[in-house]
């Protein structure tokens, strides 16, 4: 089969979500949680005679399953389960034969060499793919916006990465990370609610808190002023109904919880906030490209969906930068899946010639990924 005329498979398996679909499409066909479930009783088989469930199916049956998360901090924890997820994506969901397809997989910034080689080996040895490319998720986020130079602030489940990119190439020496993501913000929200005397239903505490976070939390453009205005009819209080029917009043928790992205010390993490990291990242780059980088700062990932995040970042980075440097922060509406979208665009281009083919893999082994994917 002529792989040049077929749609490529595009997959982004993150710590929280699986995103998968075909090249040329403007959104992933599959979006579900990165979770694997097995029956709680060893050797037990459920009514549908399955001993393993993935994604949405696992979550729907979680009361009778033991759940595991094969990705953590963007690192594979269980390769056997990751293989099963890929098999599920290719054969059960996309109904696409990997042997007859080229496959583009997302990788996190500063990915380890052994992981890069392992996923290359899996794609050729386990799935006999027709072609393969490993793409930096932050570079793909930038590509999705139609640009090749800028700084991407990519925030997911457990970490936030700041990745400066110049003409399509990530700059690893200036790439910075903060070990705070959506999970940490949800946990901090639970802590803040308890401090206010609010206890969530224990059995589903994290899920309920996550739902509250997504519906009610926002970032304050002036955190201290908003704190000081509490109790002066500031208008931030919101009534929230819990799944059990009880109602609670949310106040300071709404903006204090996500503030740890900008003030990590509130969560006990002694690091600079994402505004400082973004500026520090630009400073680590050559002086002649800093203006271009600062003029195109892109938000990407599910943990960047908080209201006012763009305005706050713009203000806070401007407070650090010289007055002659224009700071432009962009928050694309589709940023939750921005990396996948960029991969779908890149893999659809006829002029993209960096695919690893079977002959190259057979000649150079999995290490060929370092020569062609960077």
Image (cartoon, rainbow, N blue to C red):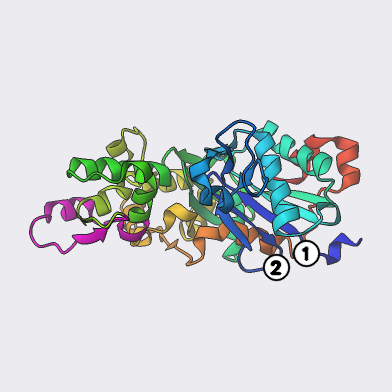
> Reading the chain from its start, which is encountered first: label 2 or label 1?
1
Crowding at dot 1, Cα within 10 Å, few <14 / some 14-19 / many 20+, comes out as many
In this view, the residue in front, 114 or 294, is 114
**235 w.r.t. 173: above or below:** below
Q: Is residue 367 left or right of residue 304?
A: right
Crowding at dot 2, Cα within 10 Å, few <14 / some 14-19 / many 20+, comes out as some
* Dot label at residue 7: 1
* Dot label at residue 340: none
Q: Position of residue 5 (x, y in %)?
A: 85, 66
Q: Are marks 2 and 1 in contact (CB under 8 Å)?
A: yes
Please say whether residue 238 is one of the residues in the magenta stretch: yes
Q: Position of residue 282 (x, y in %)?
A: 47, 47
Q: Is residue 61 left or right of residue 266?
A: right
Q: What is the distance, in whole Å, between disc 2 and disc 1 at their CAs?
A: 7 Å
Q: Which residues are magenta?
A: 214-243
Please say whether residue 263 is one of the residues in the magenta stretch: no
- Residue labelled with disc 2: 24
Quarter of the rendering containing residue 101: bottom right
């Amino acid at each position: 089969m002529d792989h040049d005329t077929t749609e490529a498979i595009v997959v982004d398996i993150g710590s929280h979500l699986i995103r998968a679909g075909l090249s040329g499409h403007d959104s992933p066909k599959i979006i579900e949680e990165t979770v694997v479930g097995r029956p709680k009783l060893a050797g037990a088989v459920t009514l549908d005679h399955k001993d393993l469930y993935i994604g949405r199916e696992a979550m729907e049956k979680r009361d009778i399953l033991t759940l595991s998360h094969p990705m953590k901090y963007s690192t594979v924890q269980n390769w056997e389960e990751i293989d099963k997820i890929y098999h599920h994506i290719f054969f059960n969901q996309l109904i696409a034969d990997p042997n007859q397809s080229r496959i583009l997989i997302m990788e996190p910034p500063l990915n380890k060499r052994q992981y890069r080689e392992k996923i290359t080996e899996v794609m050729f040895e386990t799935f006999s793919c027709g072609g393969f490319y490993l793409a930096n998720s932050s570079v793909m986020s930038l590509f999705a916006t139609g640009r090749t130079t800028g700084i991407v602030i990519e925030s997911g489940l457990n970490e936030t990465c700041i990745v400066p990119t110049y003409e399509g190439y990530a700059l690893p020496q200036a790439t910075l990370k903060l070990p705070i993501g959506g999970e940490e913000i949800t946990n901090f929200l639970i802590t803040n609610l308890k401090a206010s005397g609010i206890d969530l239903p224990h059995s589903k505490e994290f899920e309920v808190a996550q739902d509250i976070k997504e519906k009610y939390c926002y970032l304050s453009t002036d955190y201290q002023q908003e704190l000081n205005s509490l109790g002066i009819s500031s208008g931030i209080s919101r009534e929230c109904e819990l799944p059990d029917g009880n109602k609670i009043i949310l106040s300071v928790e709404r903006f204090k919880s996500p503030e740890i992205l900008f003030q990590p010390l509130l969560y006990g993490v002694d690091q600079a906030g994402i505004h400082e990291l973004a500026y520090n990242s630009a400073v680590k780059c050559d002086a002649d490209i800093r203006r271009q980088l600062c003029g195109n700062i892109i938000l990407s990932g599910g943990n960047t969906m908080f209201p006012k995040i763009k305005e706050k970042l713009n203000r806070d980075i401007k407070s650090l930068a010289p007055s002659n440097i224009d700071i432009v922060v962009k928050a694309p509406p589709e940023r939750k899946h921005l990396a996948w979208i960029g991969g779908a665009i890149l893999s659809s281009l006829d002029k993209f010639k960096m695919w690893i083919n079977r002959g190259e893999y057979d000649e150079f082994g999995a290490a060929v990924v370092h020569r062609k994917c960077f």
